[in-house]
Image: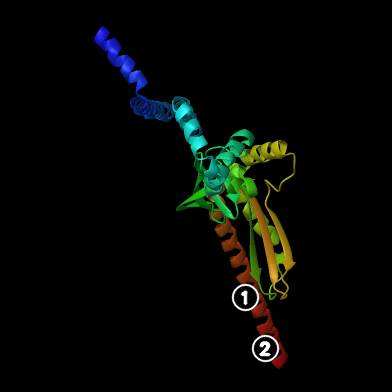
């Protein structure tokens, strides 16, 4: 017993050994907790990436506080010995310090969570992880609502100085807007009602869900947004061409599919009317000759 007590006392006084022990236990605890949370999430079919990310950050904080407490006296002595270089050190680590401050800013304001879609400086992506230095995004092409396969690493200090757009509502349903431009050889008002009817038929299977989701977004944001019925606006460009603006409120993963279907209907009606006009013009020409 005295031998064990002697070893324990020597071990507790050996700060280097204690440091390695604390680091080992911290990483082991983090590894076990992450596995348990992910296993629970898989069994329940839930997305627990936000909880996993928070567990990692909390354990990292506990590790840093523990190491600071253990080496407080040595660090204080070291700080006094480098007092003359403190300004240089602060300047050299300014970006790093700003990133750490940015992390506390994100934790306190919570502008987004893990899994949200955000836009920062024209970069759009899904938040996959955050830590003390950076925020990791899985890049999303906002035009097609698809993942590009690229990973973005944004320093936390950038999130304090740049506007953050939370696009989380777009992850499920999107107010998708696109424009069709043609020349003025055909009057689109002849068949525009048919295009609207077809657009409504493409949105019929999810119309009830879209209405509820649309109202939920309006209540949360306290604004009025377009939808869920399709909207079509006819205008002209600066060059005098006909411009058809179409807005639909639909599931994000079906936006491009519905857009292509409306494009196909429009082109079919447009060429049909153009061929009719050509036939009329040809008939009038023949009648004039006679």
Closer to the observer: label 2 or label 1?
Answer: 1
Q: Which mark is residue 44?
A: none
Residue at image x 67%, y 88%? 286
User: 10 Å neighbourhood of mark 1: few (<14), some, or many (≥20)?
Assistant: few
Tell me which corner region of the image, top left, top right, bottom left or bottom right, holds residue 15. Answer: top left
Q: Which residue is mark 2?
A: 286
269 is higher (above) or lower (below) than 73: below
Q: Position of residue 228 (x, y in %)?
A: 67, 46
67 is higher (above) or lower (below) than 283: above
Q: Is residue 277 visible?
A: yes
Quadrant location, the N terminus: top left
Q: Position of residue 54 (x, y in %)?
A: 50, 31
Residue at image x 37%, y 28%? 19
Query: 25 or 97: nearer the eye?
Result: 97
Query: How many marks overall?
Result: 2
Q: Is residue 2 left or right of residue 270?
A: left
Query: 49 or 174: nearer the eye?
Result: 49
Say what secondary structure mark 1 lies in.
Answer: helix
Say what secondary structure mark 2 lies in.
Answer: helix
Query: 149 or 283: nearer the eye?
Result: 149
Q: Position of residue 23 (x, y in %)?
A: 38, 29
9 is higher (above) or lower (below) than 163: above
Residue at image x 35%, y 25%? 21
Q: Earlier in the sequence, mark 2 or mark 1?
A: 1
Tell me which corner region of the image, top left, top right, bottom left or bottom right, holds residue 240. Answer: bottom right
Q: Position of residue 206 (x, y in %)?
A: 59, 42
How far apart in space, not on screen, are marks 2 and 1 (Cα)?
A: 16 Å
Q: Which residue is mark 1?
A: 275
């Amino acid at each position: 017993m005295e031998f064990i007590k002697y070893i324990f006392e020597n071990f507790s006084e050996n700060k280097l050994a204690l440091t390695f022990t604390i680091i080992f236990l911290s990483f082991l605890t983090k590894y076990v907790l992450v596995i348990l949370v992910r296993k629970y999430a898989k069994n329940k079919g839930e997305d627990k990436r936000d909880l996993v990310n928070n567990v990692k950050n909390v354990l990292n904080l506990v590790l840093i506080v523990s190491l600071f407490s253990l080496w407080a006296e040595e660090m204080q002595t070291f700080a006094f010995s480098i007092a003359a270089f403190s300004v240089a050190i602060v300047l050299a680590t300014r970006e790093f310090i700003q990133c750490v401050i940015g992390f506390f800013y994100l934790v306190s304001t919570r502008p987004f969570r893990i899994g949200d879609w955000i836009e920062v400086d024209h970069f759009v992506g899904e938040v996959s992880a955050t830590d003390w230095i950076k925020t990791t995004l899985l890049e999303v092409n906002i035009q097609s609502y698809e993942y590009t396969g690229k990973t973005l690493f944004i320093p936390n200090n950038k999130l304090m100085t740049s506007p953050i757009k939370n696009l989380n509502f777009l992850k499920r349903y999107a107010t998708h807007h696109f424009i069709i431009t043609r020349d003025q050889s055909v009057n689109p008002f002849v068949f525009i009602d048919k295009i609207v009817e077809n657009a409504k038929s493409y949105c019929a299977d999810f119309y009830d869900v879209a209405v509820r989701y649309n109202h939920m977004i309006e209540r949360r944001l306290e604004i009025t947004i377009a939808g869920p019925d399709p909207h079509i606006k006819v205008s002209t460009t600066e060059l005098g061409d006909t411009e058809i603006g179409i807005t639909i409120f639909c599931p994000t993963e079906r936006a491009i599919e519905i857009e292509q279907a409306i494009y196909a209907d429009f082109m079919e009606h447009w060429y049909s009317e153009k061929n009719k006009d050509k036939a009329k013009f040809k008939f009038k020409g023949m009648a004039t000759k006679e």
